[in-house]
Amino acid sequence: MSNKLKYIAENLDSLKIGLDETFKFNCTMCGKCCINREDILLKPKDLFVACKELSLKPQEFIQKYCECYVGDSSGLPIVRLKPVGENKRCPMLQGSRCAIHNAKPEVCAMFPIGRCISIDKNELENSDKISEIVYINQKVNCGDKRVTHTVREWLNKFNIPVDDEYFIEWHKVVSSMALDIQELEKYTPEKIKGLMYNNLFAFLYVDYDLEKDFMKQFKLNAEKATGMVKHIRKVAEQVKEELNGGKP
Ligand code: SF4
Ligand code: SF4
């Protein structure tokens, strides 16, 4: 877990802000939040909208601007914008402007507001019991405080739905797969794991037609990804049982 996430987790109660509570913030366009950045992770939708904006296929965008790795805690493929040069500039920063200003990643668009959701792994199949999205005010020192916003207005400004179906679905998918991957890790040969990560990467990030609706494609791809991981887990458990002489 990055230091920033650790800080947020430890101070969640004091950072929380309600949808209709206000915060003061005015971006002065200094560009400092786009340098010394190694933590701009792209979720599938971030990648999809950025690709549309630049008319690049996901694979092309990733090759040009990103690096990919397997996350330590989730065990899932992660895509992040690859910093450039000594000052670790975001590759999307052109001069003092974001090249994907109208399609910037959610984490940049919402700044200084952030959001998180906690999902009980035992309730993954039960949508009614999925926790509410929690908003946080990161209380940053940049910009000035000349403008007051409610969180709701801020989200509207960046076209981010309050009950964001995609955000909830993404976290459900990640939680469900992380659980299966933790279980299958020990009993699955490296070669199979390598193939699994390649397929997961393709399903979650690459296999999209930019002319079609994102959410429909995401749901289908997520189904393929979770189905594949569940199948590999099942096989891994059979192997484990055989190694244990028939005991689970
Ligand atoms: S994507 Fe745009 S707003 Fe976000 S860090 Fe990069 S240049 Fe800055
Ligand atoms: S969000 Fe803050 S750091 Fe980023 S450009 Fe605006 S004022 Fe500068």
Image (spheres, grey):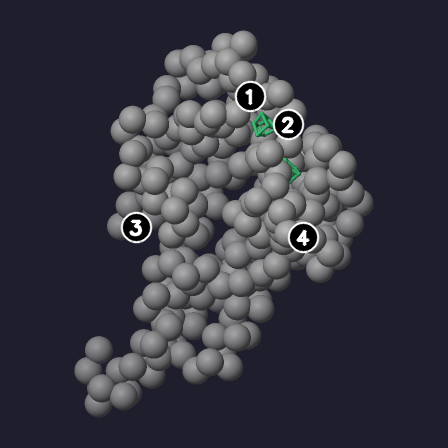
> Which callout, 4 or 3, points at the residue further toward the start of the chain?
4
Is label 2 in contact with label 4 (beta carbons under 8 Å)? no
- Tell me the mark number nearer the camera, choosing from 1 and 3: 1
Mark carried by residue 188: none
The residue tagged 4 is 85
Quarter of the C terminus within the rendering: bottom left
In the displayed structure, does residue 146 sit left or right of residue 136?
right
Query: Residue 56 in the image: x percent, y percent?
Result: 78, 49
* Ligand 2, image quadrant it occupies: top right
Front in this rendered view, residue 228 or 76: 76
Mark carried by residue 143: 1
Q: Residue furthest left?
A: 247
Ligand 2 lies under 8 Å from the Cβ of mark 2: yes
Q: Amino acid at mark 4?
A: Gly
Is label 1 in contact with label 2 (beta carbons under 8 Å)? yes
The residue tagged 2 is 30
> Which callout, 2 or 4, points at the residue further toward the start of the chain?
2
Count neighbours of disc 2 (C-alpha within 10 A) and say few if under 14, some if 14 to 19, many if 20 or more.
few
Mark carried by residue 121: 3
Q: Secondary structure at mark 3?
A: helix
> Who's the residue at 40% across and 36% down the image?
116
- Tell me the mark number nearer the camera, choosing from 4 and 3: 4
Q: Is residue 92 at all visible to an observer of this figure?
A: yes
Front in this rendered view, residue 164 or 109: 109
Instruction: Tell me how far mark 1 sits from mark 2, CA to CA.
Output: 8 Å
Ligand 1 lies under 8 Å from the Cβ of mark 4: no
Check the image and report above or below for 203 versus 154: below
> Who's the residue at 53% across and 56% down the image?
78
The number of discs equals 4
